[in-house]
Image: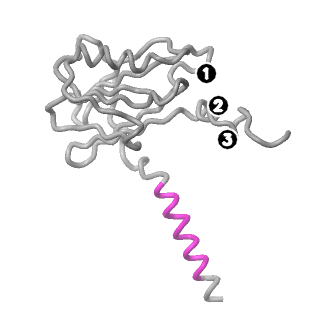
């Protein structure tokens, strides 16, 4: 009887830890992101090019991190999923970012957004691709979240929206296919 109670308590603890691990981002408020004009992009940047790993990689994004401020962007991803080019002038950063995010055959246009810190100050820019909606059902296929951490670190979480995730990876919960016979 004691063993069953012990196992039950351990199981409940593991379930609780799993729950809190999955919702830990939910307790924090992500930074605000707003539309921006190209004329606003001035100075030098550390350019973060995320994704572009293969010819059908929809999870592709460019972040222009303002050089010399006290913030740095840290994508929540392995190092091989992104590269950083330091001290790039604004015009060159935009050109490089545009070229990087526009490679996909369903690419339509880009959207530029400014990333604001908790006080409303611009700390960087995001350039993301929009795709022809006829191809995937959505023009904007990503969720991108920025969290301000200690020491000026900005944690970045980039992921495909759920309907696209289900389309891209057969065997998921969607009707996109997978193995097994119906």
Q: Which residue lies furthest to the right in this view?
A: 182
Q: Do the residues labelled 1 and 2 touch (CB within 8 Å)?
A: yes
Q: Earlier in the sequence, mark 1 or mark 2?
A: 1
| Residue that label 3 marks | 172
Using residue 108 as the reference point, say whether residue 153 is left or right of it.
Answer: left
Q: Which residue is drawn at 32% across and 28% down?
A: 63
Using residue 165 as the reference point, say whether residue 29 is left or right of it.
Answer: left
Q: Tell me where the magenta segment starts and ends, as one range.
A: 6-21
Q: Is residue 50 above or below residue 6?
A: above
Q: Do the residues labelled 1 and 3 touch (CB within 8 Å)?
A: no
Residue 40 percent coordinates (x, y):
23, 15
Q: Which residue is drawn at 34% across and 22% down?
A: 113
| Residue that label 2 marks | 167
Q: Distance between the residues labelled 2 and 3?
A: 8 Å
Q: Where, quadrant-wise, is the N terminus in this rendering?
A: bottom right
Q: Residue at x 28, y 37 (%)?
A: 73
Q: Residue at x 61, y 20 (%)?
A: 137
Q: Are marks 2 and 3 in contact (CB under 8 Å)?
A: no
Classify mark 1: helix, strand or loop.
Answer: helix
Q: Which mark is residue 136?
A: 1
Q: For this rendering, which residue is in front, 32 or 66?
A: 66
Residue 45 percent coordinates (x, y):
21, 25
């Amino acid at each position: 009887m004691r063993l069953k109670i012990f196992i039950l308590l351990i199981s409940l603890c593991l379930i609780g830890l799993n729950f809190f691990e999955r919702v830990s981002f939910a307790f924090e408020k992500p930074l605000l992101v707003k539309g921006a004009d190209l004329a606003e992009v001035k100075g030098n940047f550390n350019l973060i090019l995320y994704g572009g790993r293969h010819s059908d990689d929809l999870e592709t994004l460019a972040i222009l991190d303002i050089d010399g401020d006290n913030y740095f962007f840290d994508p929540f991803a392995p190092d091989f999923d992104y590269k950083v080019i330091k001290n790039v002038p604004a015009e060159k950063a935009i050109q490089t970012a545009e070229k990087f995010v526009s490679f996909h055959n369903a690419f339509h246009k880009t959207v530029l957004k400014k990333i604001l810190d908790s006080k409303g100050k611009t700390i960087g820019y995001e350039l993301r691709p929009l795709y022809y909606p006829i191809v995937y059902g959505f023009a904007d296929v990503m969720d991108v979240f920025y969290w301000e951490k200690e020491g000026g670190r900005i944690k970045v979480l980039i992921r495909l929206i759920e309907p696209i995730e289900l389309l891209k990876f057969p065997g998921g919960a969607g009707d996109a296919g997978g193995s097994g016979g119906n």
